[in-house]
């Protein structure tokens, strides 16, 4: 019976099993089994079997999710069970209630167990790697970036990795920003596969950046048109992640026009849908102000096309007119938690309204020529 249960565990591709070292305090509680199983992406189950010469009265699970944050947060869970000298119990982390963890992320967990005699045992921390074992992943690493994929040949991965390289080169040339810690790309074969890895997928999700984990997941098929789209998306999402790394601070984020504008510039020249939106705004003389696009864009795709196009133009204007050192200074100022107008004033000598007047004049001037 036990053998069958074990075999089921082994063949079930959704399970990740990790058993930390068995630990014992002299004459106190002793752990005979401890494990964690991931049912990707929806839940994570922690199991423990523990015994003592007297009743076990208290079992707590402690865990730390490994991600970029200002303070390491230890979560503590009290397990419910009937006190006894032998206890087997588990706790299920339902990620549909809390949001999930991406593939490639990890957490460290350990237990404390106390018995009726007042003896407490603390197990050594064990690390659980979150994997999407629904697929068999290949990997390719260059520098700080690793690309995981399961459909398509080496040339497919190579082409995407080349897009990573040129995005990093362009970013360094335009902004001085460089990748600070490892980044993993998970390339799903389609957006449907990608959505299967997410707790709350939305129909339009083609790519998602888990910045605090250093993980980017994108659905890219193997047709040339999808690869072309994929290369742009790789550059876009990588830029968000690197800019997030270099400006990370507990006080303030970036204005959306700067964050999205840098990501758009990394993609290369604007697609027709964006240039059309700009021409139409020009004809109606109805641009959105820099101050408005400092806030998050409309959730409706159609309405935000102009916001993205303007962000590209505004950032391109700053880079082309004032150069890379000033852009680097701007990012460094934001890293110190500066406000939007304050940072612009300090680096360029004008605020967001001043920037609005200047980029528009330059944009219209270029159209007249
Ligand atoms: Zn973006």
Image (cartoon, helix red, strand yellow):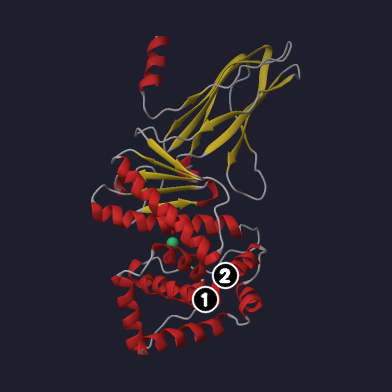
Q: Residue at x 51, y 47 (%)?
A: 214
**Helix, strand or loop at disc 2?**
helix
Q: Position of residue 143 (x, y in %)?
A: 50, 45
Q: Which quarter of the rendered picture does the C terminus lie within?
A: bottom left
Q: Quadrant of residue 147?
A: top left
Q: Quadrant of residue 84?
A: top right
Q: Residue at x 51, y 55 (%)?
A: 241
Horizontal side, residue 97 vs residue 349: left or right: left
Residue located beneath label 1 in the image: 318
Q: Position of residue 89 (x, y in %)?
A: 54, 22
Instruction: State the separation of the CA atoms marked 1 and 2.
Output: 7 Å
**Helix, strand or loop at disc 1?**
helix
Asked if residue 178 is positioned above or below residue 194 in the image, the reply reads: below
Asked if residue 337 is positioned above or below residue 123 in the image, the reply reads: below
- Where on the image, by quarter, is ligand 1? bottom left
Which numbered marker is on residue 327?
A: 2
Query: Residue furthest toward the right?
Result: 118
Q: Residue at x 65, y 39 (%)?
A: 74
Label 2 neighbour load within 10 Å: few <14, some 14-19, many 20+? many
Which numbered marker is on residue 76?
A: none
Label 1 neighbour load within 10 Å: few <14, some 14-19, many 20+? some
Residue closest to the eye, 318 or 16: 318
Horizontal side, residue 337 vs residue 40: left or right: right
Q: Which quarter of the rendered picture does the N terminus lie within?
A: top left
Count the labels in the image. 2
Specify whether residue 274 is in view: yes
Q: Residue at x 56, y 60 (%)?
A: 177
Q: Position of residue 150 (x, y in %)?
A: 33, 38
Marks 1 & 2, CB-CB < 8 Å contact: yes
Asked if residue 263 is positioned above or below residue 190 in the image, the reply reads: below
Q: Position of residue 367 (x, y in %)?
A: 36, 86
């Amino acid at each position: 019976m036990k053998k069958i249960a074990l075999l089921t565990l082994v063949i079930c591709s959704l399970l990740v099993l990790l058993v930390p070292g068995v630990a014992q305090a002299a004459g106190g509680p002793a752990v005979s089994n401890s494990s964690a199983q991931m049912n990707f992406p929806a839940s994570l189950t922690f199991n423990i079997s523990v015994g003592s010469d007297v009743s076990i009265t208290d079992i707590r699970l402690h865990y730390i999710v490994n991600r970029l944050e200002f303070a390491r947060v230890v979560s503590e869970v009290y397990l419910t069970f009937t006190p006894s000298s032998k206890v087997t119990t588990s706790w299920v982390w339902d990620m549909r209630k809390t949001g999930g963890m991406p593939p490639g992320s990890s957490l460290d967990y350990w237990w404390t167990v106390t018995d009726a005699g007042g003896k407490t045992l603390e197990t050594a921390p064990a690390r659980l790697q979150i994997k999407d074992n629904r697929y068999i992943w290949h990997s390719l690493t260059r520098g700080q970036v690793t690309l995981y994929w399961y459909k398509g040949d080496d040339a497919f991965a190579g082409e995407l990795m080349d897009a990573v390289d040129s995005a990093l080169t362009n970013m360094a040339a335009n902004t001085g920003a460089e990748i600070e810690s490892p980044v993993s790309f998970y390339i799903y074969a389609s957006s449907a596969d990608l959505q299967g890895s997410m707790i709350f997928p939305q129909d339009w999700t083609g790519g998602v950046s888990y910045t605090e984990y250093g993980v980017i997941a994108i659905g890219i098929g193997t047709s040339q048109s999808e690869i072309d789209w994929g290369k742009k998306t790789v550059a876009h999402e990588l830029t968000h992640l690197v800019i997030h790394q270099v400006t990370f601070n507990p006080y303030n984020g970036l204005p959306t026009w700067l964050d999205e504008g840098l990501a758009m510039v990394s993609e290369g020249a604007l697609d027709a849908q964006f240039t059309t939106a700009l021409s139409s705004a020009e004809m109606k003389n109805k641009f959105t102000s820099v101050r408005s696009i400092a806030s998050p864009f409309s959730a409706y795709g159609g309405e935000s096309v102009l916001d993205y196009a303007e962000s590209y133009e505004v950032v391109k204007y700053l880079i082309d007119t004032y150069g890379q050192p000033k852009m680097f200074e701007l990012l460094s100022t934001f890293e110190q938690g500066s406000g939007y107008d304050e940072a612009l004033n300090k680096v360029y000598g004008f605020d967001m309204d001043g920037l609005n007047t200047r980029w528009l004049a330059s944009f219209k001037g270029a159209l007249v020529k």
